[in-house]
Image (cartoon, rainbow, N blue to C red):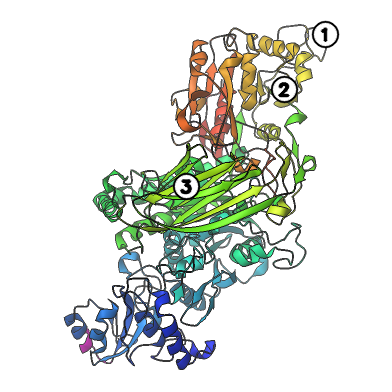
Amino acid sequence: MSETPGGSDRESRFERSGISRRQFVRLSAATAGALTLPGNAVADTTSPKFSDLYEYVVTHVPEDYAVPTLVELSDTAGFRELAANGFDPVTTTSPTIAAYISVTPADVDAVTSVDSVTALRYSPGSNPFWLLDYYPDGVFPAPDDSVDFIDFEQMVDGMRYLQGRNDDRLRFYSVGESPGHYNLFLDEAGPQNLWVAELTNDVHDDAAFSEKQKVVFTLSIHGDERSGAEAGTRFVEQLLAGDEPEVEALLDDVVLVFLYPNPDGWIARNQQYRVDTDGDGEPEHNSFKRVTATGVDPNRQYPTVGWIDSEHNPAEPDGTDLVDDEPGIDGDVPPRYTDTVPDALDIVEFLRGYDNVRIGSDLHGMFWSSDFIEGLIVNDEYDTDEFHDLYEWNRRTEHRVENALADELDAHRDRFRELNETYGNEWGFDGSALPTPEEAYDYGTILDTIGYTTSGTLISWMSQPRDQGGLDIQMMAHEMGWDNRVLDRIPFRPWLVDLQVTGYQEVIRETAQHAVRTVTGTIETGGETTAYVDTDALTRTSAALSFTDARTRTTTRHVTVGPAPERVTIDVPDTTRSVSVSLTASGLILARLRTPTGRVVQRYNAAAADSSEGSVEWTVQTPRAGEWTINVKTVGGSKEAAVTVRESLVLTDADDAVTAPDPVDVLGYQQRPYSVSPLEYFPDYAAAISGPDQRATNDGRRNERGNGNVVEDVTGMTVDDVGDGALFRGRSERRAVDNLVVNHARGASSDAYTAELDSFVEAGGTLVLTDRGVSLLAALENDLVDAIGDEDVTEIERFSAFLSERVGDHPLLADTRPIQRELWKPAPLGYPISTPGTAPLTVVEPAAFTAAGGTVAGYTNETGGSGRYVSAGSFTAGDGEIHVVGGLLPPAHQSSLHPFGMLDYTATFLGHTVLTNALGHRQLRYVDGELVATYGNLE
């Protein structure tokens, strides 16, 4: 329907809302100061030509705000008069005579004074004439033909229009509600629908729909990261118009699902809403917002396995008992979640209803980056098939995006430099130091790409196994450069949005194509056998947990910062198990976190060349009691910024490794049962081994030298087995296995065990030491490592296990990529992402390592830069070999909140490939049965 002045079905909605004209006038007077920020005048202009919503907006915005305006006219002569009055109208004569302009309150009289002007209507959106149901350049025009970003209500209206003309292929409906900003115009709460668009052939054939592979795209979960919604929304129309033939051909087999998860962050730009995301009672600028109306980051509120930050609000619709007791959101969901994250609850409940969920992408935005688009591998557990499926998907995406964008990015390099300078000039720093795009696409783990890691994200929850509450989907996040709010309001730059849409539509195409591929990964061993030292000591179970009473202390404070640092203090009592701090700012800030002794343990600089996000999250485990301090100021010091500081302390008296805060006390959820061990990696590894059996076997005789009779590709041996000679055949010096992996220090004090390890190496075996197994170096006496002593091996803890520095030509790193640094992911194993860190690495002093003849593959720096250690390397000068991977396959960590369970292991593809290379194995990747790539050299 179309609006008419004074009585719009689409805009004023007086009849539906029960608001009379008298109430509207009273409301306008009462809220005039609420929408307009201090220092901004309120216009007093009015006209019978205004629609009700237009009058409200134009009298409540700052006087310099350009209101997007649809002008209806009685004849085309008015076009010339508008131009003569200084406007640059976009015009049409169909279906009625109309023009689109942007006009400030101060200039609106120059519009109403034109005799042929009959109506003015508030018209945010990309299509200047969407309120007229007129689409000369498409429902969602290309960026070059658009006047602004796609508006939320425009999206809804346009999708309904497309559905009406493509009912057999498009289904568009709401799956829940957001918290909602207050609608000042209607004087009511403004929860928004969570919309989903499903696109497939015969979309209403429920049986066929259920069987098809689902390809899920979540668009702009952070409301100030617009590229996902801009690209995905246009893609739907393009496909329905026949402009996407390669994806359209898949619709008999796949369903494309486009989910809009954060309408609050989207509609916060519209002037009729009161935006107060920091909860300080003062209205904020109406602009796209990262967060929802309750002020929480919508991408931290999902029920992921492993460590959960107490400040987050994990949305589990099955409620306290984690059991689906009733349809919809269960009645035992604590009010904390129904009040704060109703949107996340609805999304989890909705997505769990799909069958055959194959693959998907969460399309995000970031600040500046040398990679225009980055692909982020999820924090999950992957076997060899899953690794190769993920990385082939990314390899092909990289090829596609580079072909589409590489030349375009080069052509726009000066524009990126100018944009960086604009940011720098606005905030008072050197914008020329910021990067411009050097690559169109790169990919790695979350840490590898954007420099930090997370818990509670939508993609991590989606990728988890079904029996742990997830969807078991192959999921990625993608980050788009120059797609985050640096200025108060994000200007619409058609050239930039066009690049972003081009890039993300290539991601959408490749993701859809990949859904119907079959990718497998196999491992060639050359007939060699591998053993690992088995032990129950690495198994972690929920049954072994004891819970201590716990309570939380949460505080929210609001400060305005400028060039001088503001000081925010946190009183930390000695019963504190953890402190979580988040900072959300309206601009670019510098921040530091100091201990009670004054030592800086965390820094944040929003204007750093490698900065990707506009918010800060810090966690400290077992913090020192006393007064902690946050120092925060604006970058450059030329502007002020409003900063919301939230802190959440978990207080408990217990501190042993198997006593955790009671999740019912802290989060309102019971503990999900689990039993996990990193040694589950080895059966999964064995399942990928293929090729002819080239092994010889002994006759099974056992005598005084050994008792080995290994016939499996991969087998477990206990410490006692090894000490009893299981590594050798009979009385000979012949090895029963070729390779041995040890990821723990059990047996280090057993002379029989360590002597057998020495003999194994001296007999030409390959020994691979990972995690705490590296500490065995000090106990071994073979010629390769005899010089290394107890004092040369130490354990450090970081916020994640990664190589600070790679030695790129080392054989352990063969066929890995420079961006790959992370070895395993901490949060799903219960390790908090904290300061200074809890993720363990057992490492070696560099001087001792190289003096003993070792070659270094990678170093890891101690937190704070006080030490540099060898975390990966090899000793290969003798008949046998010893390889060291200091951070790989650790046991789970149980002393922090982890109500939704644990994973067995979280090796990254780097960690997996380094271990495969250490064993002398080779990985092979097949796509639809055809060999496409190999990794490593078969020895």
Mark in front: 1 vs 3: 3
User: Residue visible at 50% across and 60% down?
Assistant: 221
Residue 870: x %, y % from top left: 51, 22
Q: Is residue 336 above or below residue 463?
A: below
Residue carrying label 1:
703
In space, the residues marked 1 and 3 are separated at their CA atoms by 67 Å
Q: Is residue 859 magenta?
A: no
Mark in front: 2 vs 1: 2
Secondary element at image label 3: strand
Q: Quick one: label 2 or label 1, which is nearer the N terminus?
A: 1
Secondary element at image label 1: loop
Q: Quick one: label 2 or label 3, which is nearer the N terminus?
A: 3
- Which numbered circle lies on residue 746? 2
Q: Is residue 77 magenta?
A: yes
- Give neighbour class at mark 3: few <14, some 14-19, many 20+ (Cα, 10 Å): many
Residue 815: x %, y % from top left: 48, 30
Mark in front: 2 vs 3: 3
Q: Is residue 153 above or below residue 280?
A: below
Name the residue type under label 1. Asn
Residue 30: x %, y % from top left: 44, 83
Range of the magenta residues? 74-79
Residue carrying label 3:
630
Secondary element at image label 2: loop
In space, the residues marked 2 and 1 are separated at their CA atoms by 26 Å
| Residue 509 visible, this orientation | no
Q: Quadrant of the C terminus?
A: top right
Left or right of residue 844, residue 604 in this image: left
User: Residue visible at 31% across and 52% down?
Assistant: 637
Q: Quadrant of the N terminus?
A: bottom left
